[in-house]
Image (spheres, rainbow, N blue to C red):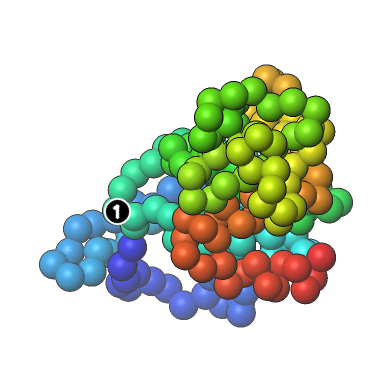
Amino acid sequence: MDAVAKGARRPRSAIGGRLEPLAEVVVSLHRGRSLDVIREVRTIRSHWNGLVRPEAFATAALFAETIDLFCEADLAMPEIYALLTAAVAAVAGSEAPAALVPRFQLRLLHALGLAPADDACVRCGGAFDQHGAWLDLEAGGLGCERCYGVRGDAHALSADDVANFRALGAERGTGAALHGTVRVTRAADDLITWHLGRRPKSRALMHELS
């Protein structure tokens, strides 16, 4: 959004006129020829006290950047907005915010219609057994041992990992999980990278501060 605040009064305090990052606001605009004019801004909700911690802010910044990379600027997506606001609130109240990243990543892919198939083998349609499954980024889903067992363990998931993978992507109240196993965490991160073609810049800072 490109806008300018014409005639805005200079704040008397050095911090009096700030806009807290990741706060929810209502903005009243007047449509201009090249730039819209800001008439009023009201804060609805702010989690700044929880986000001021470096690890929490870096995690929330990763969430915001990931959504920004996936979505078009002028396209309203209420479900994605609701996901972000809920995720930011969860980060602000968490003692280990980085642990929430895999849940956010898989929920985002589900909301965008990009989530990998996890109910049956993406190649043969067979069910998964006690040997777990393998994530195939190119095929867009999980595969069974019969189809993928000879490919190594780069994206191998145990039976418990498969259950965790499904639970992370589930909606709240339907057996959802908040935290991912080590292998599922790596798989979710690789899925995001696969779809974007690169890793979000905020990811490195989050891992440095976690």
* Picture layout, residue 91 above or below residue 207: above
For image coordinates 17% across by 64% down, the residue present is 32
For image coordinates 54% across by 50% down, the residue present is 137
Q: In this view, does 153 lie to the left or right of 171?
A: right
Which quadrant, please, contains the N terminus? bottom left
Quarter residue 117 falls in: top right
Which residue, as the protein is rendered here, is positioned at the far left?
33
- How many discs mark residues in the rendered view? 1
Tell which of 76 and 12 is nearer to you: 76
For image coordinates 77% across by 49% down, the residue present is 183
Quarter residue 210 falls in: bottom right
For image coordinates 78% across by 33% down, the residue present is 131
| Mark 1: amino acid | Asp
Tell which of 100 and 88 is nearer to you: 100
Q: Where residue 53 sits: x, y (%)?
A: 78, 64
Structural crowding at the residue carrying mark 1, measured as other residues with C-alpha within 10 Å and reported as few (<14), some (14–19) or many (≥20): few
Q: Where residue 87 sits: x, y (%)?
A: 64, 45
Q: Where residue 17 sits: x, y (%)?
A: 54, 70
Secondary element at tag 1: loop
Q: In this view, does 151 lie to the left or right of 26?
A: right
Q: Where residue 66 sits: x, y (%)?
A: 53, 58
Tell which of 139 and 111 is nearer to you: 139
Q: Is residue 119 left or right of residue 168?
A: left
* Picture layout, residue 112 above or below residue 30: above
Which residue, as the protein is rendered here, is positioned at the far right?
95
- The residue labelled by disc 1 is 74
Q: Can residue 45 be seen in this view?
A: no
